[in-house]
Image (tube, rainbow, N blue to C red):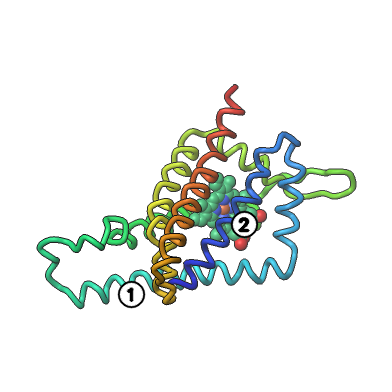
């Protein structure tokens, strides 16, 4: 769980960095060219297959781990351990919501860009899919904006506990380093989730005004 989780966290950082280009006022040139490169480079495509695989493995692992923990203690604790936080006890629920979000998200973007009918745009002599326009169409709808912003709250809850927990599982628990890892995890969580939530919000308000 920890290794797939850390890989998926790394994916989120890369994904957010690329998606920031959706906010550029360049008619989508930077983002569309980037998406075209990511969608056609064989190395990136191999990593993308690994990414899908890790999402599924991480989710199934999470279900199995929760079932195993429940089996070990069929009767719930009368009072919960102080060291087990509300975040850690609800990891499966947050994960399940994120999994559903990913399915909806893939049908919104990945499926349309790979298998749907999507307009293309020419920059000089290169013609690429206009995923920038697709994102702007989606995020002109307040329902999608609310769905994406709301889902980022669950990503935040999940990462808040998950990041430091992954390091503990690997065995990197240390008096000196654990507080640093925890703080880095909290900082990363806030940055990634605010960044992802800002994209649909800023596009929505840019279109509105
Ligand atoms: C504002 C938020 C987000 C935007 C605008 C966005 C945008 C996109 C776009 C445009 C694609 C399709 C790329 C293509 O097929 O060419 C994509 C793929 C994907 N997104 Fe997002 N995304 C966002 C947040 C997230 C989050 C929070 C997650 C995970 C929790 C996520 C997971 C994925 C995955 C797994 C793929 C498939 C990647 C692949 O093809 O390998 N996205 N996203």
Q: Residue at x 62, y 66 (%)?
A: 48
First in sequence: mark 2 vs mark 1: 2
**Front of the two marks 2 and 1:** 2
Residue at far top of view: 209
How far from the left and from the top, in percent, is residue 21? 68, 44
Circle 1 residue: 64
Residue furthest toward the right?
125
Q: Is mark 2 within 8 Å of ligand 1?
A: no
Q: Is residue 93 above or below residue 147?
A: below
Q: Image check: 128 left or right of 75? A: right
Which residue is pictured at 50% across the width and 43% down the height?
A: 194
Vertical order, 138 against 160 (above or below): above
Residue 98, numbered circle: none
Position of residue 11 measured from the top left corner of the image (x, y, whole percent): 57, 61
Residue most extreme to the left = 78
- Of 209 and 112, the residue lying toward us: 209
Q: Nearer the viewer, residue 53 or 192?
A: 192
Judging by the rendered image, the residue that carries numbered circle 2 is 14
Residue closest to the eye, 142 or 192:
192
Circle 1: is it few (<14), some (14-19), or many (20+) Cα within 10 Å?
Answer: few
- 10 Å crowding of disc 2: few (<14), some (14-19), many (20+): few
């Amino acid at each position: 769980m920890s290794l797939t989780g850390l890989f998926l966290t790394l994916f989120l950082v890369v994904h957010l960095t690329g998606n920031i280009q959706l906010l550029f006022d360049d008619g989508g040139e930077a983002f569309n060219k980037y998406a075209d490169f990511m969608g056609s480079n064989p190395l990136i495509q191999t990593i993308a297959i690994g990414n899908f695989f890790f999402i599924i493995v991480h989710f199934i692992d999470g279900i199995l781990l929760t079932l195993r923990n429940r089996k070990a203690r069929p009767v719930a604790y009368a009072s919960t351990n102080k060291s087990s936080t509300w975040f850690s006890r609800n990891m499966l629920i947050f994960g399940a919501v994120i999994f559903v979000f990913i399915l909806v998200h893939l049908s919104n973007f990945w499926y349309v860009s790979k298998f749907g009918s999507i307009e293309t745009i020419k920059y000089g002599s290169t013609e690429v899919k206009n995923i920038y326009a697709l994102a702007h169409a989606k995020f002109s709808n307040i329902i999608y904006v609310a769905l994406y912003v709301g889902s980022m709250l669950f990503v935040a809850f999940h990462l808040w506990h998950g990041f430091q927990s992954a390091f503990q599982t690997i065995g990197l628990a240390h008096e000196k380093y654990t507080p640093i890892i925890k703080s880095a995890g909290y900082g990363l969580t806030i940055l990634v989730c605010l960044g992802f939530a800002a994209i649909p919000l800023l596009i929505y308000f840019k279109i509105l005004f």
